[in-house]
Image: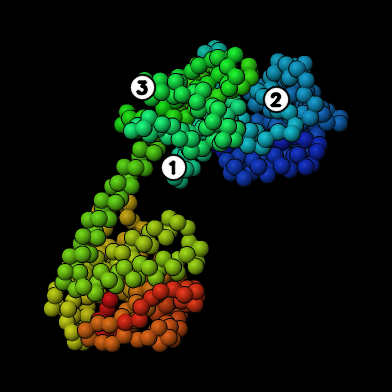
Amino acid sequence: MLSTNEVSSERKSILVVDDDIGTRSLVVDAICQAGAYAVTEASDGVEGLERLGENHFDMVICDVMMPGMNGMDLLDKIREIKPTTHVILITAYPTIGLTVSAMKTGAVDFLAKPFNIDDLLYKVDVYLRAKTILGEYDKQTTATSLTTKISDLSTRSYIYDKIELTKNNDEIFQEMVDLALKVVGGEACSILLYDKDHQEFDAVVVKGVSQTFFKSVIIPSLHSILRDTVRRKEPLLRNLIKNTAYSSVICSPLKIRDQVFGIIALSGKSNEHVYTERDLYYIQSIANRASLNIENRLLYESLYTNLLSTFQSLVASIQARDYYTEEHSMRVTDIVIKTAEAMSCSPSEIESLKIAATLHDIGKISIPDDILLKPGRLTTYEFDVIKNHPVIGENILKPLPILDTERLIIRHHHERWDGNGYPDGLAGTNIPLFSRMLAVADAFDAMTNNRPYRKAMDVEAAVAELKRNVNRQFDEEIVNYFISTLRRGSTISPRGIMTDTGHVV
C-alpha cells in the first residue's frame, strides 16, 4: 500500500477544456492554487484533442456543451487514444440520460453547473490518488473488489492529508465536518463534545443547519444513538426513513486512550442520504485520524510544557544567585513579543521568541559567582568567560530537537549588525532575524534597569542610544518597529544601563 506522502508527492497533469473563459479560468486558477498539479487549458474540444496528442494527461476536466467538438465527442476520442485518462464532465444542462451516457462512455464523474469549486478539487484529488494507487497493483487486474479497494485507499489518503494539515483542535473539528459532508454527503454534520460528569453533549461545530435547530431538534432526536455510541465506544449507523428529523445517521466516537471525549454526527434528510457501511467506514476513518492527531498534540504539548518548566527551574536557580536575571528575562520577553506583534510575526514565531527570550540567559548557570555578581568592571578574562553564556545556553538545549529554532536564537542574540559581536561574528542579515529582535529587547532592558555597578538610563536616553547604534550593533528596521511599540504606550519600567565593554546581560 502506498503511504500518504507517496500518493500525494507525484505531480499530476490536468487538461481543462471549456469554451467559457470564465469557467475555465476559475477551474484552472483553483487547481493551480492547490499546488500539486500541472495544468494546461484548451478553449474547445478540437484544441483539447490537439493537446492530448502532444502531451500525457492524467485527467481531463471537460465541458459538455462546446462548439465544433463537444465534450461527449471528446470523451469518445479519449477512450480510443488514451483509455486510462480520467475524465470529469461539466454541464449547465444535466439530464439523467446524459449522465448515464457519460458514465457508460467512461467518465469518472459528472458535475452540474453551477458547481462548488471545493467539491471539484476534492474529486480531482481523490481520483488522481486512486490512479496512483492503481499503478502499484497488477495492471491486468480489473476486479470490482480491487476498484473498490483502490477507491477506499485514495479517499482515506485524502482524509489523512487534510487532517494532518490542520494547526489546532478548532481547525481539526472544522475540517472533520467539511470532510464528512464531502466524502459521504448529508444534510447536517456536527462535532459534539461529551461531558462525562453530566452526560451531556455540546455541539461545538455545526454545518448544514443552524446551530439552534441542531441543538433544539437534531440532538434530542439523536440522544439515544449518541449515548449508545459513547457506551459501545464504536461507530453506529441508523437508517430511519420515516423519521421527521433525519432519514439516516452516522455517529462515530472521538477517543483518547479509549475514552470517548466527543462524537462526529452526520445526518441525512432525504432518501438520497441513506448511508451505507462504506460511508460508516469513511466517517470512522475521519474520527480515528482526528483523534490520533489530537492525542499526539496533547502529548506533545504536555512534553513541551514539562521541558519548559524544567528550563524555567534552571533560570530560577540563577535567580537564587542573581535576582536580576529572572526579572530581566521576563521583561525582555514582554518587549520582544510586542516587537514581534508590531512586525506581524505569526503565532508560532511569537511562541518561539517567547521561549527563547525566557531562556536567553540560561547559559549563565555555568558562570562563577565571582564573575556573574562582580560589582565592578570586568577584566578581559572575566568578560571572555561571561561571553560564553550564549553558547552554553545553546548547548543546554541542543539535545532537544523540538527546540532547534530557540537554541539558535539564543546562540546569536549577542551578534552585532557590523560583525563585531559574539560568538560567531555574524553580520547583517546573516544573523537570524529573531536573534536580532532579541538583541534590541535585551539591550533596551539592560539600559533602562539598575545594576549594582551602574545607574539606569531613562527611556528617552535609551532610545537615543539604540538609534545611535543602528547599522552598527542593531538592525535599523527592528529598532524602528520597537520604538513604534513605545509610542503605542508599551509599559516598560526605566531602571538600568548597558555598556559594550562592561557587564554583558
Q: Is residue 393 left or right of residue 134?
A: left
C-alpha span from label 1 to label 3: 24 Å
Residue at the disc numbered 3: 231
Q: Residues within 10 Å of mark 3 (few under 14, many from 20)?
A: few
Q: Nearer the viewer, mark 2 or mark 1?
A: 1
Examine the image and state in which quarter residue 139 appears. Answer: top right
Examine the image and state in which quarter residue 45 appears. Answer: top right
Residue at x 58%, y 32% (from the top left corner): 213
Q: Position of residue 189 (x, y in %)?
A: 54, 30
Question: Could you say which is closer to the camera, residue 98 or residue 326?
Answer: 326
Q: Nearer the viewer, mark 2 or mark 3?
A: 3
Q: Secondary structure at mark 1?
A: helix
Question: Could you say which is closer to the camera, residue 357 or residue 99?
Answer: 357
Residue at x 28%, y 82% (from the top left corner): 450
Query: Which numbered dot is residue 8?
Result: none
For the N terminus, the image quarter is top left
Q: Earlier in the sequence, mark 1 or mark 3?
A: 1
For the C terminus, the image quarter is bottom left
Residue at the disc numbered 2: 110
Residue at x 18%, y 76% (from the top left corner): 372
Q: Is residue 410 visible?
A: no
Q: Is residue 92 visible?
A: yes
Kindly identify the amino acid type of the residue bearing the numbered disc 2: Phe
Kindly identify the amino acid type of the residue bearing the numbered disc 1: Asn
Q: Earlier in the sequence, mark 2 or mark 1?
A: 2
Q: Position of residue 114 (x, y in %)?
A: 74, 34
Residue at the disc numbered 1: 169
